[in-house]
Amino acid sequence: MFQTRPTPTNTPFLIGSRTLGHADLEEQLRQVAARLIASGLQHKRVLLMVRDDLAFAPLLLGCMRAGAIPLLLDPGTAARQVKDLLEHTRVDAVIADADAIELWRAQDIPLPAQQIRVGAVQAKGALLSKLLGRRAPADLDNWPGLLTAPAPAPAPLPPARQDGPAYVVFTSGSTARPKGVEMHWPALLAHLHTIGEHYALTPASRLLNLMPLSHADGLVQGVLLSYQRGCTLVRPTPFSIVAIEAILIAIYREQVTHLIAAPTALALMQQYGAHLAENFDNGHFRFAISCSAPLSAATWNSFSQCFNVKLINTYGLSETGACGLYAGPDAASHKVGSVGVPRDMRAKIVRDDGSEAGCDEAGELCLQGANLMHGYLDNPQASAAVLREGWLHTGDLARRDSDGVYWITGRIKDVIICGGYNLSPEAINGVLMQHPAVLEAATVSLPDPTWGEVPVACLVLRPGMEADQQQLLQHCAQYLGAHELPKRINFTGQLPRTPSGKVITAQLQHALSVSPMEASAHGNQQEDIFALAASLFHLPAGVLQADSGPTNTPGWDSLAHINFVIGLETLFKVRLSPSDVVHMETMDATVQLIKRLTR
């Protein structure tokens, strides 16, 4: 990748809070690589957990250029999860935000001796040197301090790696320990070539990628693809409801050619940004790309029609790099509701007995290709369970139609056993999504003393539309058997999702299982609200104050904010409007909001 990319220029590589040119990026990543090589970290594992895009990109690429192996964790990962990782995985160095390292040290989490702290850390002796009129010594243990080091010696860096591990990303599990997906260099390079060719990327392309950079779709279809193809990555602001207007304006202002986002972001952009649809008419935009989670036909059609753009759907796993199948942009594979056809991969549908299924027959989707992972990090048993005879068993149920186009029908593991019947949450969701008032649906199981498990659906309704439980159950009865109907339907403003867009089943189950009457039995709403917030933000009792808000409270990020909304709606049996959600700026404002809604 480092040898074959176009000659760097000072055209933009990253447009965000500031602009980073390709030439500046090249210089920075070489300094990072030289620092890591001098520290003996070639072929060693480096935990990388950084919030700022402008620091993340050169640190990641410098790590890979040095031949080290970055282990990527989302910056919002809880300290106890970091501790668990460090206890079960060999890590030789850490590159992380300075405040995160301080938090880990305060909690006595054992860290590798070699560390690079990222943040506003002043180089050692900088103030004294400034007073004495001397240049401050370089502090190679912090970013951006290490950039003040003298230029590398004339001797070139060692050749870049072309084999062995390139990076490790962790699957977004919500109950079990996440597995580290180990991607090797040949698989990464093959995958970047496929995506670049399929999207027809050139150095003039500008990709607005809304996915977290520590996740496969942000990493591969963001930083790595933009670097390898010599084009521009646009990251105007982290995605949130209140940022939608800024994102749509950036599509026009920055002459974006491709938008890459999860279905949730696409649905919210249409829901809250339809009045800015003209921003896609920038003279350069080609198509939008949905990734990371299932894209419903309703969202697919409504987004395309609202913004008058082509939307293509991709299917893939961290285990395939990012993508594997593509529905579009070619007309033959662009079937709304499908995941299209494999590109530079082979796919097959297999029955329970291992034989290959026929046309339109459902079975497990299996994939084979040069872009498959090497395996799960330090977990040969888990690797052997999904990689069998050269095929990746995805755990997804699918069918292939007569045109060779694939359709996802559910997941093998997502089964609710209710009264002896095996129910598919995806099937229930699919029926609910056909109702014109339903924007999003997620069905989970809750324990029941009589039935063992019961399906409970949580819905987000379209703006300005109404539907009650009875109406929706009557709708479901047209398509589902009586034993398949959800036993309860809850309404909410948002579904809890991981940063990559997947519904967090455990969080949703917890929120739905809360008993509002029991939680509020003592009648003190303020105490209930503060207790809920402390639990969701993983804070000890007493930390939250009346003026605590997203800008000054650790753990109160966009994802936690959505979980907070769901918890409040469940706890107090209220519906929060988009305006309510945006104005939950402090704990006091939230308390006053709930008091007003429950009068």
Image: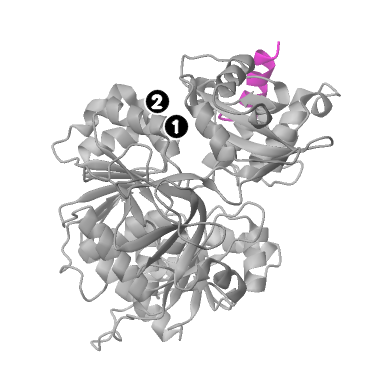
Q: Do the residues labelled 2 and 1 touch (CB within 8 Å)?
A: yes
The amino acid beneath tag 1 is: Ile
Residue, disc 2 = 272
Tell me if residue 177 comes above or below residue 536 in the rendering.
below
First along the sequence among labels 2 and 1: 1
Which quadrant would residue 189 be assigned to in this image? Answer: bottom left
Residue, disc 1 = 241
**Which residue is rendered at x = 70% and y = 33% of the image?**
512
Q: Which of 337 and 130 is in front in this view?
A: 337
- Image coords of residue 424 (percent x, y): 60, 40
**Which residue is rendered at x = 30% and y = 69% of the image?**
190
**Which residue is rendered at x = 69% and y = 17% of the image?**
595
The N terminus: image quadrant: bottom left
The amino acid beneath tag 2 is: Tyr
| Residue 135 appears in the figure | no
Relative placement, left or right, of 4 versus 538 is left
**Which residue is rendered at x = 55% and y = 36% of the image?**
427
Q: What stretch is highlighted in magenta?
A: 584-599
Tell me if residue 152 comes above or below residue 226 in the rendering.
below
- Image coords of residue 72 (percent x, y): 49, 64
- Image coords of residue 470 (percent x, y): 63, 15
Which structural element holds mark 1?
helix
Tell me if residue 206 comes above or below residue 82 in the rendering.
above
| Residue 490 appears in the figure | yes
Identify the main secondary structure in magenta.
helix
Count of numbered badges drawn on the protein: 2
Which quadrant would residue 378 be assigned to in this image? Answer: bottom right
